[in-house]
Amino acid sequence: MSKTICHPAAGFVAGIILAANISSGAETPPKFLGANSCANSSCHGGGGAKQNQFLVWSLKDFHSQRPAATLTTARSKQIADALEIKDPSASSRCTTCHAPLRDVPESLRGENFKVSECVSCESCHGAAENWLRAHTRHDYTRADRTAAGMRDLQNLYVRANTCIACHQNVDADILKAGHPELIFELDGQSVAEPKHWCAEKNGNGAQAWLVGQAVALREMSWQLANEKSPTESEINRWNALVWLMQTAAPESNLKMPPKTRAVTIAYAASTLQGESDQVARDFATTDWSDTKTSKILSAFANSNESFRDTAVSQNLQARRAERLVLALDRLVASLPEYKNNEPMQSSLNQLFKLAQSIPDFDPKEFAAALEKLSAALAAH
């Protein structure tokens, strides 16, 4: 499974098919039946709060139309021209994430299957042929549904792996052509999603954040190891996430990458992929508590000395800050007592402001702002 997951740009649909096939024990992959198979008013197309999932997705969720529509914009055309891609809406390098159903083989398309559905129900929940009728049975457990091929998105590790394929890595040449960098953040991106699931199934926000970062580190390690000539910026982005995970979870024993460029890349290939994947698995099954969240938040708030280390380049410090402010936001959000804490929120806003520009980043100023956050945390 890790080989499929670690090929986000080329194996998204293949991963969906493989995972569903393995889960169901079928000899042949199950078919994709299309979103309309979920849309009956007595199922997920009704008006009630527990039956409106199809309506939320089709009317409110950007996954429904926007990813494919993006491929028709002038900016996408410009990126495609730089890559010598004639039509981004028909190239698998683009559609694998923006319109993944285009890559589903004809033999696996059900009667109501529509390519135009973009990132649809089965993109996340798995090809539905083997579980559609049975998954509503009252005597079915989560294990029964998973065994039938329905992806268990309540499992944070499974959820992170489902989303990471299109929300983290972008090939270096696509980035150079103008595609924006992506930062995967499972909790924040889940919160931004129009909800078509029960709140209690969302899981703890801080735990989701940590699992997502560990999976992101695995994917970034894979990409770095497979890049022929990674740039310093790519290495620094990866290095910053290693630092973040070490600070958040020192018990995981993730080691700091070596100093030299060649050894760093080899280290990413041989060590960090497996280690970070195991960290993600472990934290996905941990009994979480606010105490754990507070401990990580405190470690981050007291990391100001790291930003005063003059041996660390300005670019790497900026990349650390870029990751850190997003982490602080999710950790603070998961602790209700800080929601209306003015000193805490003011310090957090200042840190976000200071981390906005990589070229203009001032590590000392950021360290001073971190001290204020630490003081606000201690005073609470």
Image: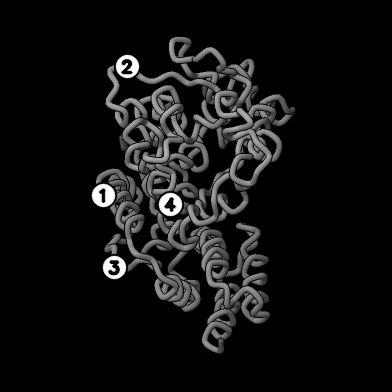
Estimate the x, y position of residue 119 in percent, counting from the top left. Answer: 57, 31
Q: Which mark is residue 28?
A: 2
Q: CB atoms at circles 1 and 4 under 8 Å apart?
A: no
Q: CB atoms at circles 3 and 2 under 8 Å apart?
A: no
Amino acid tagged 1: Thr
Which of discs 2 and 4 lies nearer the camera? The answer is 2
Q: Is residue 344 left or right of residue 132?
A: right
Q: Quadrant of the C terminus?
A: bottom right
Residue 311 appears anywhere in the view:
yes
Amino acid tagged 3: Glu
Which of discs 4 and 3 lies nearer the camera? The answer is 3
Residue beneath the point at 43% across and 54% down:
213
Residue 305 appears anywhere in the view:
no
The residue to which callout 3 is attached is 251
Residue 149's image quarter? top left
Mark 4 element type: helix
**Mark nearer the N terminus (1 vs 4):** 4
**Mark nearer the N terminus (3 vs 1):** 3
The residue to which callout 1 is attached is 271
Q: Quadrant of the N terminus?
A: top left
